[in-house]
Image (spheres, helix red, strand yellow):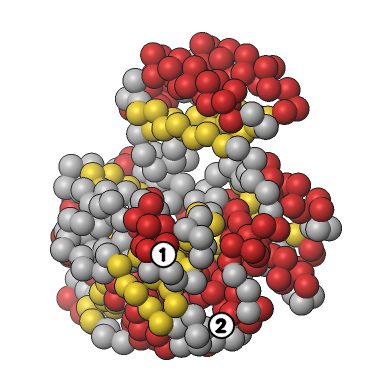
Amino acid sequence: MGRLFGTDGARGIANIELTPELAMNIGRAVAMELISDSVEHPTFLIGKDTRLSGDMLEGALIAGLTSAGANVKLLGVVPTPAVAFLIGKYNADAGIMISASHNPFEFNGIKIFSDEGFKLPDDLEEQIEKIVLDNKIPYKKAVDGDIGTVERLNCAADDYIDHIADSIPSDLKGMKIAVDCSNGSSSVTAKKLFERLGADVDVLYADPDGVNINDDCGSTHIENLQKYVIENKLDAGLAFDGDADRCLAVDDKGQLVDGDYIIAILAADLKSRGKLKKNAVVGTVMTNMGFNKFCDDNGMKFVSTKVGDRYVLETMIREGYNIGGEQSGHVIMLDFCTTGDGQLTGAMLMSLINRRNAKLSSIATLMQRYPQVLLNVKVSSDGKLAFYTDKAVKNEIKRVSEILGERGRILVRASGTEPLVRVMLEGEDLDEITKLAKETAKVVEERLA
């Protein structure tokens, strides 16, 4: 994790940690990195979610990019994967998404994509950090006719919807579903997309006001959608996060179908049709142990990476795999997209159910989940850094590991996007792992808060 960029871009409380000055300088720096003899005026796309601070940071990025000589095309409110896809469609040199994903509205972030629609590699992010943070490389100042231009595009959301609709192998006619838009980016795309695919759609939390994004809704608050699906006797529900790069599902019985289940269902379908490349699926160290068993039972190879969809994607590209993701709902289908795409994931899942004329609750039984407990411990900035060396925390992790043996596992890690240390335990006995998780969380809090 870098000094400026975490696992998912630069992120912080808007106007306090992520200031307009910082955003402008990031814009300057990334433009400088792309300007060359062959690309004199690189074109950047800028998208944003519905946060109040989005306009402020957009303006700062425009100033930074154009002052260094880059041209800017504004996409307006769109999902993060729309930015990644539209870079290629519009022949742009890079894209920037202004979003803090699933975080509360007071946070915001800057995600940068390359000309191929992938998140920037670590070495390029490090170079941008050196320009912005170390002040050793003077900022480039374009003058006269070299100053960049700005253009606003009104077709971005529709072009993205067309792409998703064209990627789905079969329609959703006859299905009754609900979509929770988290008062975020999917508020401008989900209804149109799923109705175009033929579904009868109830749209929830699609009235953004700048401050209600992710507020008791979306993929981080799935309980509201669960209740709605049961009360209205729907076939399924889909919940997205603020920038719609994640998707979680709710089955016809109101049960959560998380990212692990969704990936298992989609991977098994790909394998049955001979389209699962190298018979492999990529996950992370947070992937449930039940997923490993599912892969073993179905002749698939499970490949584990560090937490973060960027690491999943890097492995997929390097090894030639075509599906992977995270329990949180980041699902990457490399045949169709270059990043996690919540609406593509949800549409693919619904299409599969409809094609098989089956219920999601029955299909999801193909994988059995091990009991899992996840506790988030708020820590100080110094505590988050000390986590990697604190002996008391290390000794506690060792103690719990020895107790669990082969019956379970413990994973304790610092969040890449928030001031948290996450304590996760899995095992056969829910009561046992709950007790051990609380004991470990207490040690973390005492040492690092």
Camera-nearest residue between 142 and 75 = 75
Q: Give the residue displayed 26% in from the left and 85% down from the top.
A: 154
Q: Give the residue displayed 34% in from the left and 79% down from the top.
A: 191
Answer with left or right where residue 31 lies relative to residue 59.
right
- Is residue 428 among what the camera can see? yes
Q: Name above or below for residue 291 compared with residue 420.
A: below
Q: Give the residue displayed 49% in from the left and 71% down from the top.
A: 235
* Image coords of residue 224 (percent x, y): 34, 56
* Image coords of residue 347 (percent x, y): 51, 75
Q: Amino acid at mark 1?
A: Val
Query: In the figure, residue 153 lies in which quadrant?
Result: bottom left
Camera-nearest residue between 440 and 6 = 440
Answer with left or right where residue 341 lies relative to residue 371.
left
The residues bearing labels 1 and 2 have C-alpha atoms spaced at a distance of 23 Å
Residue of label 2: 168
Q: Amino acid at mark 2?
A: Ile
- Secondary-structure class at tag 2: loop
- Secondary-structure class at tag 1: helix
Answer with left or right where residue 251 lies relative to residue 105.
right
Answer with left or right where residue 234 lies relative to residue 285.
left
What is the quadrant of the C terminus in the image?
A: top left
Residue of label 1: 229
